[in-house]
Image: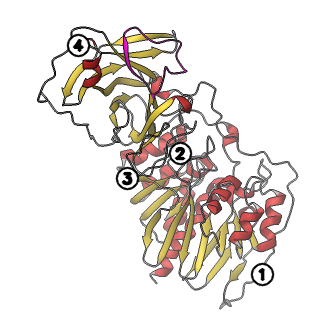
Amino acid sequence: MLIDAGDNGKGDDVANYVKKEGITSLDYVVATHPHEDHIGGMDEILNDFPIGEFIDSGYPHTTQTYEDMLNTISNKNIHFSTVKRGDQINFAPGIVVEVLNPGNTYFDDDLNQNSIVLKVTDGQISFLLMGDAGVEAENAIMGDGYDVDADVLKAGHHGSSTSSGKTFISAVSPSVSVIEVGAENDYGHPHDGALETLQKVSKVYRTDIDGTITITTDGSTYSVVTEKTADTDSTETPTETSTETPTETPAETPTETPTETVTETPTPTEIPTGTPTEESDSDSSGSSGGSSHSSGSSGGGAGGSPEPQSNVEYKDTTKAFISNGRTVTFNFTNDVTVVNSINFESDKTMGKTTAIVENLKEKSSLVSDLPEGEIYKSFNIWVGNAGYGNSDSIMNAIVNFKVEKSWSQMNGIDQSSIILYNYDEENKEWEKLPVILSGEDNEYLYLTAEVPGYSSFVITGDVGTPNVQTTEPTATYKSSNSEESEGVTVTEESAEDQESPGFGLISGIVCLFCMFLYKIKNQ
């Protein structure tokens, strides 16, 4: 198992280190989160080794680095999965790998707090690997009652001021703490407060001082060997004595005030972030006492939609991979909204993306008025983040929806007059979209419409001669279940989102000890 792969340009170094250890394939590769200093070297890893499974946090990012990585995964047909708190990774007999973060819901707009956190236990020895998770994630993990006690801690976020909270570190109570940090980095990592907290309970190793840090275990004992200081630390007496006296980690205070990594800040008009909150691929919730039709948690709150949740009657959430040039289908299987599915093509790869449908109680707060005709239902569809669902990147977009026959019969609606309206946000007006009857049963008419994108919609009909109710359906609608297309996301990553040079190689190498677990376990 390899956890992270370093910065751009460092992938070959990580790959060569892995090969030097005699490893020719990787059962698992984990990307804790999409920042460049953690995934920049992934392309080299993915191209150099057979990969059993690639594990991602599921929290999307919009950088070329992330897109390149996911494109490689797609092109090489590597199995891709996302994890959440409570999952376990089937790594090797006798070794337990627990996922402690991210949780069932994501922290808004913070890649670091949504980092994958793993607790690896081999017999009596345990390791806690924090990625770039900080205090918020630490509190959430403890709040959910997880046992964080560990012998070895890979400190979160390079020992920044936003990580390694005193309460959390006290609960972990590590004997050894490892801080991945670049020498003389521009961020002032590690922060003196975090360093002091860690030094009070553990021996601290730093990659800027100690170089490559190798930790091995056989499940009963563990040993720490460092590159630069020739330091050996073990839970049992070493058979050989190091040629140098073990060097205590200096508690030097950075001369610069640390500047934390700036995460993306949504603009006021941003469409929902791609933040799935469900246990399964589809999740539903109702804001007025509606019952859920899946085991997933509520998709409520303002995390994924600009619509005030007080106006949302029912919500359904699902996710799929979006790849460049491929048709992707999002199936809403909970049957709580008017939408059965949507499908479209994309001119760029967006990766694992969330789509949301909201049945509204009243007119959407995002539109100025309602279109003409008898209103059946107002609803919203959101896809991805940053306005992607209503952008020029989407082509041949389709909405498959349903209308109750009882509504048309009770209101004397001519079925041929049923229209779907889409709100044109730029011109502040409704666009009429013709619909096609794709099927019907005893309860519903099933309709399809081509749409320019996904935002706010209204279904209407004109009063006319009531239709005669049919005793048998002429066709039965079945929701399409096309395979999820695989793919990936784009934009320039700000300089502040990138960690300083030097974090890259260490990010991949320190976490290689997971592979040593397997190696030693089988010796």
Q: What kind of element bears circle 2?
A: loop
Q: Nearer the viewer, residue 392 or 180?
A: 392
- Pointer 3: what residue? 78
Q: Quadrant of residue 336?
A: top left
What is the x, y in percent for residue 408?
27, 19
Q: What residue do we see at 41% from left, 41% from top? A: 318
Q: Which residue is mark 4?
A: 416
Q: Mark 1 — residue? A: 244
Report whether 140 appears left or right of 81.
right
Q: Which segment is the magenta one? A: 360-378
How much space separates mark 2 and mark 1, taking CA atoms? 45 Å
**Secondary structure found at label 4:** helix
User: Is tag 1's residue or tag 3's residue first in the polypeptide sequence?
Assistant: 3
Q: First in sequence: mark 1 or mark 4?
A: 1
Question: What amino acid is at disc 2?
Answer: Tyr
Find disc 2 in the rendering and name its residue: 59
Against 335, is 513 above or below?
below
Q: In this picture, is 136 found above or below 86?
A: above
420 relative position to 117: left or right: left
